[in-house]
Amino acid sequence: MQAQPITVAYGDGIGPEIMQATLDIILAAGAQLDIDTIEIGEAVYLRGNTAGIDPSAWDSLRRTKVFLKAPITTPQGGGFKSLNVTTRKMLGLYANIRPCVSYSPYVHTKHPVMDVVIIRENEEDLYAGIEHQQTPEVVQCLKLISRPGCEKIVRYAFEYARQYGRKKVTCFTKDNIMKQTDGLFHRVFDEVGAEYPELEKEHWIVDIGAAKLADTPEIFDVIVMPNLYGDILSDVAAQIAGSVGLAGSANIGEEVAMFEAIHGSAPRRAGQNLANPSGLLLGAVMMLVHIGQGDVAEKVHNAWLKTLEDGVHTYDIFEAGVSTEKAGTREFAQAVISRLGQVPAQLRPVSYEAAKAKPMQVKLTQYADPKIDMIGVDVFLYHNDRDANQLGDTLKATVQSDMDLSMITNRGVKVWPGGLPETFCTDHWRCRFKAHDGQFISYGDIIDIQQQLTEAGYKIIKTENLYHFDGVPMFSAGQGA
């Protein structure tokens, strides 16, 4: 077998120890790798690189297209970017895959039959990180959801379920509140799911879905979610399965893939030969499957399961009466190596035969562009007089336009006309101007309104145009509207 080029970063804190243990195990199992080592993390940050990664490292990642990464330490304080977020977005790693499996009775858990795979969108949502201080009292974070982003992750989830013999795909969103953004994710889930008739499909509102996941995870199989919910709930799922320290993850893009543990660099445990390498090792197992060395992945994974089953445990999962040996990082790695070729007797052995069949293909649907008509504008004002009725009446008298002032909201709650005096208001107001029924407007009409407001002394924060797509309104109303 020809050696597969991969890029390896030893990271910070416990990173170097668990990376060495991981490489020792997979190389002993026969992994054919051509390793290019790069430096990332704290030392790079402290050299003045706010991204934590040097330009030369990007060259390695673009050449090998496979990244095995240990945890890093981001210095405290402002000005430092998340390297994980940067890497995922720069390399288009749109899918985060986190298997969350219980290993009862060898690792303590309240959910002994849990076997859930969480597939999380990785590039957009609130993690776009577009934030602004808009008034002295109000800050904004933009939640960006795209149809291609939704379709890529949803199709990946269904393809993953099909390839790995899963039975059901569940979608979590909050589209009862965020009808445009989460609503789009849900709609795409329904559209794509119809192409997989052999798989069961279901949708949960994320709050009750999260409660069910924490209480009864065995009812779920594959769960697909937007970025923020997936980030939070994949950690919850890993912890209730037994330990965040046992979970690995894959970040998959069209060209490049990154594999890692989901835990942090734990600098307090660095250099003590204590850290559990299991999360990074299982990330490496996912890497081996990805690069077509599934037989090696199978050998490593089963040896790791046999080690757990034999009670050889690191300090974080050691339990008297269950564990037989408290092993350090190096000793645990040697225990796994000594069991290569063995399979567990009680835990279910793994097989990666299905992964050898063919690579998953995710193709996007081509849509015709809709007919787009502009019918109004939301003008956001900074105005520190908290009387909504006075603001509405003054604006109505001030602005002369083919559009009417139809509504004012404050933090999304309708406060004019017909607002309630009990509603608390800040200095941030959304003023909606809409054309008369059936009429469309131009950008010139919006500029004219802005000009009138500016001349009257109002402070405009921003505007958002209001559109119909194929005759359907594509904007939210205010609560209470």
Image (spheres, grey):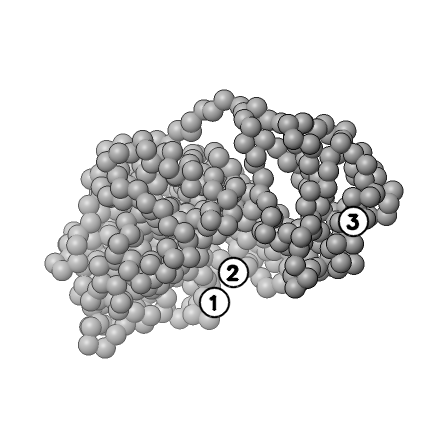
Identified by mark 3, the residue type is: Asp
First reached walking from the N terminus: tag 2 or tag 1: 2
Q: How many marks?
A: 3
Q: Residue at x 47, y 24 (%)?
A: 367
Q: Quadrant of the N terminus?
A: top left
Is label 3 in a helix, a strand or a loop?
Answer: helix
Q: Which residue is mark 1?
A: 267
Instruction: Report the side of 284 relative to 357 (left or right).
Output: right
Is label 1 in a helix, a strand or a loop?
Answer: helix
Instruction: Report the side of 316 relative to 450 (left or right).
Output: left
Question: What x and y, as percent, mark residue 421?
Answer: 68, 62
First reached walking from the N terminus: tag 1 or tag 3: 1
Q: Which residue is mark 2?
A: 73
Dots 1 and 3: beta carbons under 8 Å? no
The foreground one among 154 and 475 is 475
The foreground one among 357 and 228 is 228
The residues bearing labels 3 and 2 have C-alpha atoms spaced at a distance of 54 Å
Q: Please indicate, yes or no, whether residue 170 appears anywhere in the rendered image.
A: yes
Q: Residue furthest bottom?
A: 320
The mark closer to the camera, 1 or 3, is: 3
Q: Which residue is mark 3?
A: 393
Dots 2 and 1: beta carbons under 8 Å? yes
The quadrant in which residue 320 appears is: bottom left
The residues bearing labels 1 and 3 have C-alpha atoms spaced at a distance of 59 Å
Identified by mark 1, the residue type is: Pro
